[in-house]
């Protein structure tokens, strides 16, 4: 199965691979600086271990033909849905959310891997012959594959991940050639349904949106995260405070500092200059991804590359937006940086898919 | 591709936001992060200790808890600051307005603590600690507090310590909530006794747990003061005065050292260190017996028969009388149409000068005073330090009064009154003590000394007082000798008999200051004086006792002086044995 082809090896996108690895190394280093306190180096070590696991997964995925994976998409998708249902039934609860399944020493977050399966499934549906030509039928066929997991994930509750599914699907549909008029109609319908969504939201989620609109609504409660993140980022100034000086992070004023708010830690430590370098890495990675999608002559490869890159892009933009106070806080990790094995694994699998598409672009 | 452009645009917006946060507003956020992590913990400096002449502390300090607000650490926006103050008010049952006022008076960004309430209970402290995270800028601070051996001990002499009042705040020398000596030695020596507060900057984590000490400035405790007071004598004098209103001054005639100074009724000095409530304060201020008044320096009385010593001295020195001159005392003396009476009905019969002192014969001294003349008497009174401050420097000292001749000259009636220490002459018990000391030591007018030296906590000397002579009274040695002998006789064979102690030669003079009769029985009673020194040969102490409305000096004041002298000369050995 793992037939090594010289042409495949020639087309490995080393730049993309190197950028992803660099981001992961930065992640481990940043987490290591946090362990000055009580937690010890455990967090950084686990992240490093997951990085290794993720790299293996990346190599495996890159070697596999992505078309095979798309063909297997319905099975993977159902597997993912089963995982989500399982979480719903016997998941571990952390700070009021059931997102994890405990497997011995590991806790797995199925929704993270599911995001990748979802992309594959969407590509499978859009490129299936029943959905051709791309139009209203395609739209109607693909909406349920987003809606079902949406319902499951929002129940966890995990608003951020749930909301991620729709923009990615829209980008895929447009990439597949969906008319903008149709898309506009769908988006309008979605917006019209927003008041309904308000009813579905939990109290704390509503509060977060209100706090975004007015951060000083409750400075010690919901807005605490935003304020502390802004203080952490801002106090880094131009050149950063260095590892020892990054008191917001080191002294735990910053909540969720190793997961969703890891960027604020980085920003406090390395300042504006460091942030600029990090953002450049991310932008290179994402533009490279879109480039791979554009360069692929084969529709399935094109959509897979577009889908996983959009998946990463939407997460990166939303996470950075919320940490810097531009967007309301929805729990979305920063791909490749935030602590979390499932997220790391999913992100590296996504990179693996990109590499796979790139390697086979001339086939 | 369009999507690539969209992502790039989003990144540009994020970079813009980072530029705003980190470069444009970076300084503000840096300050905010320092506010987050740095806590300022004041360390209050202990007030200096006052010691007696043997090194026994007259006051001490004990750690106590004080609720303080640190303005800089309070939330910045008014709404959440009010919420914090509201929580404190509810938690510790402090009026909300009081907290608001305390904070409103200081700069919002200042570091020094605003001390809101002293004397927190352990329960209160536990509450503050428990709610620490919800009460930024609110701390339970350890602040040394004055403690006293007993609640009224040397109250007037030591003085009370209390938070700076509005007047003192207006002068600008004190901060709100600062403890300031308000009377007595605490006030006189406040700038020395007051130490300099220190503080710590601590780095804390998000849970408020200290992580690291960033900076520390040690508090400098106040200077130690060695007074001239003898705690044992002070105690004995207070015991002897129990139940009477008045004053006792005990002085060393050899150097002017004040060994004891008592004023009764006393106030409970320890009531002031915490928060004294308004009603208790009003009760003290409106008490008809004026417990806050230090009668030893702040009250003036007619010297009465004690003044006869001075008349005798003047008469002998000026040659107006000799010890051999006699007068027939019939109990009455006529001057023009006025009749002056002796205190003893029927009179003392034939008396000479010594007999007149011993029996305190008024008739003899009326004549003696007229012979000497009012102007000369007033001159002698001034020479002995009456009518002028003693230099003791205790706040509110009264100067007393010595009459001056007016344009009409000096009416003879006034001289008659003056010669028995009545009329237009007023003295304080401290002035009388100094006068007696001058008689005892043969003419040296010492400034009363209360403070021997002041030392910093490291032992270096701030101030020392070797004693100071304010003046001399030049009398012939024969005259001094005569006075001492007569005063010895007054105790051993006269009006001061109640002060006699076998085995100790005491010289003394009684006095009964007549009060312009008021209808009320007790208030109309005369003030009783007794002024003594001992031993006669080599005087070591002067004891002056004044009992307001006590009646006869010989009957009330002399026994009190006896108790004090007894304690000084005969209980000392026992006390040392017990202590040793």
Image: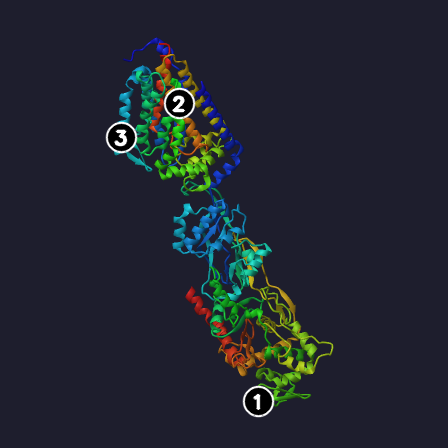
Crowding at dot 1, Cα within 10 Å, few <14 / some 14-19 / many 20+, comes out as few
Relative to A84, say whether B92 is above or below.
below
Q: Looking at the image, which is closer to me, A339 or B202? A: A339
Q: Is residue A239 visible?
A: no
Q: Residues within 10 Å of mark 2 (few under 14, many from 20)?
A: some
Chain to which the residue tagged by mark 1 belongs: B
Q: CA distance from mark 1 to mark 2?
A: 132 Å
Question: Same chain for the residues at labels 1 and 2, yes or no?
Answer: no
Image quarter (top left, top right, bottom left or bottom right) of the N terminus of chain B: top left
Quarter of the image with the C terminus of chain B is bottom left
Q: Position of residue B472 (x, y in %)?
A: 65, 69
Pick the residue in front: B559 or A345: A345
Residue that label 2 marks: A182
What separation in Å lies between label 2 and label 3 (alpha carbons)? 32 Å
Residue B285: give x, y in percent of width and height. 52, 67
Q: CA gap, disc 3 to disc 1?
A: 120 Å
- Answer with the quarter of the image where residue B359 lies: bottom right
Q: Position of residue B139 (x, y in %)?
A: 45, 49
The mark nearer the N terminus, 2 or 3, is 3
Q: Dot 3 corresponds to which residue?
A: A85
Snapshot quadrant of residue B313: bottom right
Q: Which residue is mark 1?
A: B345
Q: Is residue B157 above or below residue A27?
A: below
Query: Badge 2 sits on which subunit?
Result: A
Q: Are marks 3 and 1 on the same chain?
A: no
């Amino acid at each position: 199965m793992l037939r090594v082809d010289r042409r495949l090896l020639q087309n490995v996108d080393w730049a993309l691979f190197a950028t992803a690895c660099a981001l992961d190394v930065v992640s481990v280093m940043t987490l290591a600086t946090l362990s000055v306190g009580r937690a010890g180096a455990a967090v950084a070590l686990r992240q490093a271990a997951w990085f290794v696991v993720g790299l293996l997964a990346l190599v495996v995925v890159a070697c596999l033909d992505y078309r095979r994976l798309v063909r297997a998409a319905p099975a993977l998708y159902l597997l993912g849905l089963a995982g989500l249902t399982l979480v719903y039934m016997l998941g571990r609860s952390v700070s009021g959310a059931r997102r994890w399944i405990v497997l011995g020493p590991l806790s797995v977050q199925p929704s993270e891997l599911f995001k990748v399966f979802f992309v594959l499934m969407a590509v499978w549906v859009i490129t299936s012959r029943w959905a051709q030509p791309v139009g209203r039928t395609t739209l109607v066929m693909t909406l349920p594959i987003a809606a079902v997991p949406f319902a499951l994930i929002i129940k966890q509750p995990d608003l951020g991940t749930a909301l991620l599914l729709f923009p990615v699907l829209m980008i895929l549909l447009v990439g597949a050639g969906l008319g903008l008029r149709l898309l506009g109609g769908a988006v309008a319908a979605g917006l019209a349904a927003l008041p309904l969504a308000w009813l579905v939201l939990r109290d704390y989620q509503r509060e977060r949106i209100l706090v975004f609109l007015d951060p000083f609504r409750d400075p010690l409660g919901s807005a605490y995260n935003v304020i502390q993140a802004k203080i952490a980022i801002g106090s880094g100034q131009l050149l950063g405070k260095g590892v020892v000086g990054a008191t917001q992070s080191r002294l735990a004023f910053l909540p969720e500092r190793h997961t969703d708010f890891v960027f604020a830690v980085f920003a406090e430590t390395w300042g504006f200059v460091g942030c600029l370098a990090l953002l450049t890495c991310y932008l290179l990675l994402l533009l490279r991804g879109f480039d791979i999608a554009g360069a692929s002559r084969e529709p399935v490869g094109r959509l897979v590359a577009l889908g996983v890159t959009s998946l990463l892009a939407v997460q990166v933009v939303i996470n950075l937006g919320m940490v810097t106070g531009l967007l309301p806080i929805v729990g979305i990790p920063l791909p490749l940086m935030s602590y979390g094995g499932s997220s790391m694994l999913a992100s590296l699998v996504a990179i693996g898919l990109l590499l796979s598409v790139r390697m086979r672009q001339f086939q | 591709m369009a999507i690539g452009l969209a992502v790039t645009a989003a990144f540009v917006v994020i970079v813009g936001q980072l530029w705003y946060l980190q470069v444009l507003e970076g300084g503000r956020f840096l300050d905010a992060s320092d506010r987050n992590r740095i806590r300022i913990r004041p360390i209050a400096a202990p007030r200096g200790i006052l010691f007696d002449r043997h090194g026994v502390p007259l006051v001490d300090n004990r750690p106590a808890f004080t609720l303080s607000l640190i303005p800089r650490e309070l939330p910045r926006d008014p709404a959440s600051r009010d919420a914090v103050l509201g929580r404190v008010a509810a938690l510790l049952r402090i009026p909300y307005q009081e907290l608001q006022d305390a904070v409103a008076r200081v700069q919002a960004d200042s570091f020094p603590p605003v001390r809101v309430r002293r004397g927190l209970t352990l329960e209160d402290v536990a509450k503050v600690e428990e709610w620490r995270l919800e009460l930024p800028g609110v701390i339970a601070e350890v602040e040394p507090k004055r403690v006293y051996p007993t609640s009224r001990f040397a109250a007037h002499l030591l003085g009370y310590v209390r938070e700076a009042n509005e007047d003192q705040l207006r002068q600008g020398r004190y901060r709100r909530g600062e403890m300031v000596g308000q009377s007595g030695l605490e006030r006189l020596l406040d700038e020395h006794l007051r130490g300099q507060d220190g503080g710590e900057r601590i780095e804390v984590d998000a849970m408020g747990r200290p992580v690291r000490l960033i900076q520390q400035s040690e508090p400098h405790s106040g200077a130690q003061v060695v007074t001239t007071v003898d705690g044992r004598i002070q105690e004995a004098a207070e015991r002897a005065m129990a139940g009477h209103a008045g004053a006792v001054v005990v002085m060393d005639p050899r150097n002017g050292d004040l060994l004891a100074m008592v004023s009764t009724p006393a106030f409970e000095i320890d009531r002031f260190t915490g928060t004294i409530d308004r009603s208790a304060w009003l009760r003290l201020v409106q008490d008809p017996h004026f417990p806050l008044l230090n009668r030893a320096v702040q009250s003036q009385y007619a010297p009465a028969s004690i003044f006869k010593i001075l008349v005798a001295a003047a008469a002998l020195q000026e040659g107006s009388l000799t010890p051999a001159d006699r007068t027939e005392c019939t109990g009455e003396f006529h001057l023009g149409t006025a009749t002056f009476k002796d205190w003893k009905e029927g009179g003392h019969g034939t008396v000479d000068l010594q007999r007149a002192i011993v029996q305190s014969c008024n008739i003899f001294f009326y004549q003696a005073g007229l012979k000497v003349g009012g102007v000369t008497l007033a001159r002698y009174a001034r020479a002995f330090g009456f009518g002028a401050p003693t230099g003791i420097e205790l706040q509110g000292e009264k100067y007393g009064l010595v009459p001056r001749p007016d344009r009409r000259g000096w009416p003879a009636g006034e001289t008659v009154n003056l010669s028995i220490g009545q009329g237009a002459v007023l003295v304080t018990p401290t002035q009388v003590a100094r006068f007696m000391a001058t008689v005892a030591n043969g003419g040296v007018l010492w400034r009363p000394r209360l403070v021997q030296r002041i030392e910093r906590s490291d032992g270096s000397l701030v101030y020392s007082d070797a004693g100071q002579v304010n003046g001399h009274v030049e009398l012939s040695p024969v005259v001094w000798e005569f006075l001492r002998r007569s005063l010895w006789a007054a105790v051993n064979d006269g009006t001061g008999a109640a002060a006699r102690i076998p085995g100790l030669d005491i010289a003394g003079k009684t006095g009964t200051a007549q009060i312009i009769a008021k209808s009320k029985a007790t208030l109309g009673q005369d003030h009783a004086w007794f002024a003594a020194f001992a031993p006669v040969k080599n005087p070591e102490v002067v004891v002056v006792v004044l009992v307001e409305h006590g009646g006869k000096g010989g009957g009330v004041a002399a026994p009190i002086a006896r108790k004090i002298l007894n304690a000084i000369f005969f209980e000392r050995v026992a006390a040392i044995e017990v202590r040793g």
